[in-house]
């Protein structure tokens, strides 16, 4: 299955709605906080998996440990940081001392 333009339009709309509600795009973590997917995986907030389809954008999913900080919207292939949890997530990663 390949992704359509409509999928990306709806995905963008959903992301914009979530941002308006106070969520942060996980893709922005590296830019704004210096936190990478690798660090989130090492801290066990994300779990890697093999991409099964061309319709998969991410090769990670949110773990139980990551759920207090992160929300996964599988229908839109989105992972976002929950409102008011960004600083807590940054502190938890820094406390864990997970290297790049």
Image: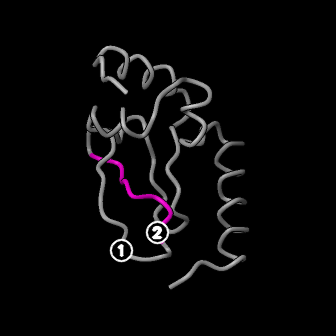
- Residue sitting nearer the eye, 49 or 65: 49
- Residue 22 position within the rendered picture, expressed as x and y whole percent measured from the top left: 64, 36
Mark 2, other Cα within 10 Å: few <14 / some 14–19 / many ≥20:
some
- Residue sitting nearer the eye, 17 or 53: 53
Q: Quadrant of the C terminus?
A: top left
Identity of the residue drawn at 30% across and 23% down = 98
Left or right: where 12 falls relative to 73: right
The reply to whether callout 1 and callout 2 are in contact (CB within 8 Å) is yes
Magenta segment's dominant SS is loop
User: On the image, numbered disc 2 is attached to which residue?
Assistant: 56
- Residue 23 position within the rendered picture, expressed as x and y whole percent measured from the top left: 60, 39
Identity of the residue drawn at 68% across and 68% down = 8
- Residue sitting nearer the eye, 85 or 4: 4
Left or right: where 97 falls relative to 17: left
Identity of the residue drawn at 47% across and 28% down = 35
The magenta region covers 56-63
Q: Is residue 18 above or below residue 44?
A: below
Q: Secondary structure at mark 1?
A: loop
Identity of the residue drawn at 60% across and 37% down = 28
User: On the image, numbered disc 1 is attached to which residue?
Assistant: 52
Mark 1, other Cα within 10 Å: few <14 / some 14–19 / many ≥20:
few
Number of callouts = 2
Whole-angstrom CA distance, mark 1 to mark 2, is 7 Å
**Which quarter of the picture shows residue 97?**
top left
Numbered label attached to residue 64: none
- Residue 38 position within the rendered picture, expressed as x and y whole percent measured from the top left: 37, 38
Is 13 magenta? The answer is: no
């Amino acid at each position: 299955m390949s992704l359509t333009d409509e999928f990306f339009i709806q995905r963008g709309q959903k992301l914009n709605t979530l941002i308006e509600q106070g969520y942060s795009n996980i893709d922005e973590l590296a830019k704004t906080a210096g936190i990478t997917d690798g660090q989130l995986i090492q801290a066990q907030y994300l779990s890697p998996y093999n991409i099964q389809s061309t319709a998969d954008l991410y090769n990670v999913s949110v773990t139980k440990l990551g759920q207090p900080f992160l929300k996964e919207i599988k229908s839109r292939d989105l992972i976002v940081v929950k409102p008011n949890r960004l600083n807590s997530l940054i502190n938890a990663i820094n406390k864990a001392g997970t290297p790049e």
